[in-house]
């Protein structure tokens, strides 16, 4: 039987120009550079300027991914955007990006799985490419998370940033490269540990991020390690046989904790949390693009993506680049 795979044809990312350091934050919030670095590994974050929207970051990342893929954008027939900070309640940010890119056909929609959104989006696009009439999918993670932060709450506002990353997937008859395996999960019992206290139906407001950080931390390390192991094992591999890990960039201590649990070498784990902070659904494709552009991740390498977020939701994707 012919096997189809979704091959990663191109990657791209975009960050707002404005960089906010920990020291700058400490001028307005009761915190310090030392506390933030020690507890999270974060040194700085990029913050969108007034009038710069999630769709702007997403469209710029998409343009770069399409150019990197070397195809004409008219080939894109599926756009999936993972975001928790859409431009508007509707239409979807995917539809707005479709318009910004000048694409006039195919399907476009948003996925909401908070920080795990990109992994969910990849799984959905991969399934639609394999089972449907689609040939080229654009999967984007894009956030202006700064817009839903309570800038007086030091326990959350120091941890997040804005950005976007994108991948172009192409359906190909191959077993040599592409997405091998996806694993996604959710457990709604933990909705109250990480959430936004507003929304169109309940409050008619946008709301702010609320989090019980230490409990989120505990679940994240445990669930991510299980997801990575299951995703690798279903492909007949152990996690430490994989060349590169591109984790969700929430906290360096979470990355270290998972690495220790799975006996990974520090050099296998791509970390951009120091420079980008937690950009929610954008963090995995942003980190992936960073490691491709700096020459670490090369064509043919075996790569695992993983993420964890509100819901709780979590998941992993195994691919050969
Ligand atoms: N600056 C200085 N002090 C701070 C602070 C800040 N920005 N934020 C919290 N604190 C204080 C707390 O008030 C608390 O003080 P107290 O002991 O006097 O009550 C103290 O630091 C310890 O707080 P705690 O929450 O127990 O710290 P922690 O070691 O768990 O680290 C996080 C806090 C948020 C960095 C950590 O729990 C974490 O990263 N959790 C996961 C968050 C995450 O990744 N979320 C997204 C998942 S997608």
Image (cartoon, rainbow, N blue to C red):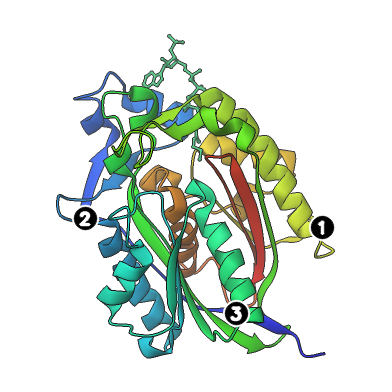
- Residue 31 shown left or right of residue 236 in the figure: left
Report the quarter where the C terminus lies: bottom right
- Residue 121 picture location, percent across and down: 53, 63
| Residue for badge 1 | 233
Of all residues, the one furthest to the left in this rendering is 50
- Residue 293 picture location, percent across and down: 43, 69
Residue 78, can we see it? Answer: yes
**206 and 21: which is toward the camera:** 206
| Residue at screen point 26% across, 23% down | 152
Disc assigned to residue 129:
3
Q: CA distance from mark 1 to mark 3?
A: 24 Å
| Residue for badge 2 | 17
Of all residues, the one furthest to the top in this rendering is 30
| Residue at screen point 57% across, 58% down | 119
Task: Say if disc 3 is inside 8 Å of ligand 1.
Answer: no
Helix, strand or loop at label 1? It is helix
Q: CA distance from mark 2 to mark 1?
A: 41 Å
**Which quarter of the picture shows residue 226?**
top right
Above or below 259: residue 216: above
**Which quarter of the picture shows residue 55?**
bottom left
| Residue at screen point 34% across, 45% down | 145
- Residue 13 shown left or right of residue 138 in the figure: left
- Residue 271 shown left or right of residue 257 in the figure: left
- Residue 304 shown left or right of residue 297 in the figure: right
């Amino acid at each position: 039987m012919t096997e189809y795979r979704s091959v990663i044809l191109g990657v791209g990312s975009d960050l707002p120009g404005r960089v906010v350091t920990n020291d700058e934050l400490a001028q307005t919030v009761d915190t310090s550079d030392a506390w933030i670095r020690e507890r999270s590994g974060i040194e700085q974050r990029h913050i969108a300027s007034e009038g710069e929207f999630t769709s702007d970051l997403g469209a710029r990342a998409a343009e770069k991914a399409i150019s990197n893929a070397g195809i004409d954008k008219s080939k894109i027939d599926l756009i999936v955007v993972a975001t928790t900070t859409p431009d508007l309640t509707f239409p979807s940010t995917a539809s707005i990006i479709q318009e910004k890119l000048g694409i006039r056909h195919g399907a476009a929609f948003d996925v909401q799985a908070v920080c795990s959104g990109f992994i969910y989006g990849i799984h959905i696009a991969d399934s639609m490419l394999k089972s449907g009439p689609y040939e080229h999918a654009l999967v984007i993670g894009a956030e202006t998370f700064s817009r839903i932060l309570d800038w007086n709450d030091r326990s959350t506002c120091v941890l997040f940033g804005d950005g976007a990353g994108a991948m172009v997937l192409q359906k190909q008859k191959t077993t040599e490269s592409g997405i091998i395996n996806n694993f996604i999960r959710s457990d709604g019992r933990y909705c109250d540990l990480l959430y936004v206290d507003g929304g169109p139906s309940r409050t008619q407001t946008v709301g702010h991020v609320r989090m019980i950080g230490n409990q989120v931390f505990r679940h994240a390390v445990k669930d991510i390690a299980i997801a990575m192991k299951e995703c690798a094992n279903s492909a007949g591999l152990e996690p430490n046989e994989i060349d590169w890990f591109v984790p969700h960039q929430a906290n360096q201590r979470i990355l270290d904790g998972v690495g220790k649990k799975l006996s990974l070498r520090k050099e296998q784990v791509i970390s951009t949390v120091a420079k980008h902070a937690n950009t929610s659904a954008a963090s995995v494709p942003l980190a992936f693009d960073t490691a491709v552009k700096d020459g670490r991740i090369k064509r043919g390498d075996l790569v695992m993506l993983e993420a964890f977020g509100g819901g709780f939701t979590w998941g992993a994707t195994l691919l050969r680049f």
